[in-house]
Amino acid sequence: MTIRVVLADDHPVVRRGLGAMLRSADDIDVVGEAADGHEAVRAAITLSPDVIVLDIHMPGLDGVSATREIRRAAPEVGILMLTMLDDDASVRAAVSAGAGGYVLKGDPQDRIVRAIHAVACGDAFLTAGVARLVMDAPPDPFAALTGRERQLLELLAAGVPTTAMARRLGVAPKTVSNTLSTVYAKLGVTNRTEAALRARDAGLGG
């Protein structure tokens, strides 16, 4: 499967460099670019990419605010933060807004490509230092979940397949997968199995 990607960064040199790097991957197709947060939201809606790669600091609408808008307007689109910022506040804001992945511009090329693949598949991907920040979150990470996220986690812990979740909620399976990727990021896990185990340990899905 070819992964359709939109790149959102206010620096043209960064977009060109990242685009050239991603186009060297056989299964990634860069279908659009955005120079600010508003353009990123429009591209997510009009181009329907599998993944949108966002920087945090962009003019007009920052990456965190754009993430919230994309989650609302195009929930089927996976969101990967690619930024220079690895401080606690930035990481938590991005994950809480709905980013399913968070990597740094200084990360190796193969890690960025793996992050895109993970987010496209509905998994979470947090680069090493970022993962530690999430794991050091307050004692009850479940408190950070929205009502819909908690509902999906309950179903996941009960062993309900993604397609069945989608039918129950009246949304597309891709929307369920992307929402779950945000749940994984908030819980500091990377996949369905780890999330289910944490949920069951917390008494969910019984």
Image (cartoon, rainbow, N blue to C red):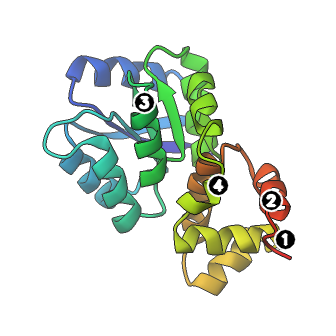
Q: Earlier in the sequence, mark 3 or mark 4?
A: 3
Q: Which residue is mark 4?
A: 140
Give the labeled residue for mark 1: 159
Amino acid type at circle 3 is Leu
- Residue under the point 46% across and 32% down: 88
According to the picture, the residue beneath numbered tag 2 turns out to be: 196
Reply above or below: 152 against 190: below
- The spot of residue 91 in percent (x, y) is 46, 36
* Circle 2 crowding by C-alpha within 10 Å: few under 14, some 14–19, many from 20: many
**Which of 185/5 is in front?**
185
Dot 2 or dot 3: first in sequence order is 3
Work out whether mark 1 precedes mark 2 in sequence or the reverse, and give the earlier one.
Answer: 1
* Image position of 13 (left or right of 188): left
Q: Can you tell which mark lies on residue 76?
A: none
Query: Of helix, strand and loop, which one carries label 1?
Result: loop
How many residues crowd mark 4 within 10 Å: few (<14), some (14–19), many (20+)?
few
Which residue does the numbered mark 3 point to in the structure image?
82
Q: What's under tag 1, amino acid-wise?
A: Gly
> For the residues marked 3 and 1, what is the alpha-carbon distance in whole angstroms?
32 Å
Q: What residue appears at the point 74 percent right and 74 percent down from the top-left corner?
A: 155
Is disc 1 in contact with disc 2, using a CB cutoff of under 8 Å?
yes
* Helix, strand or loop under label 2: helix
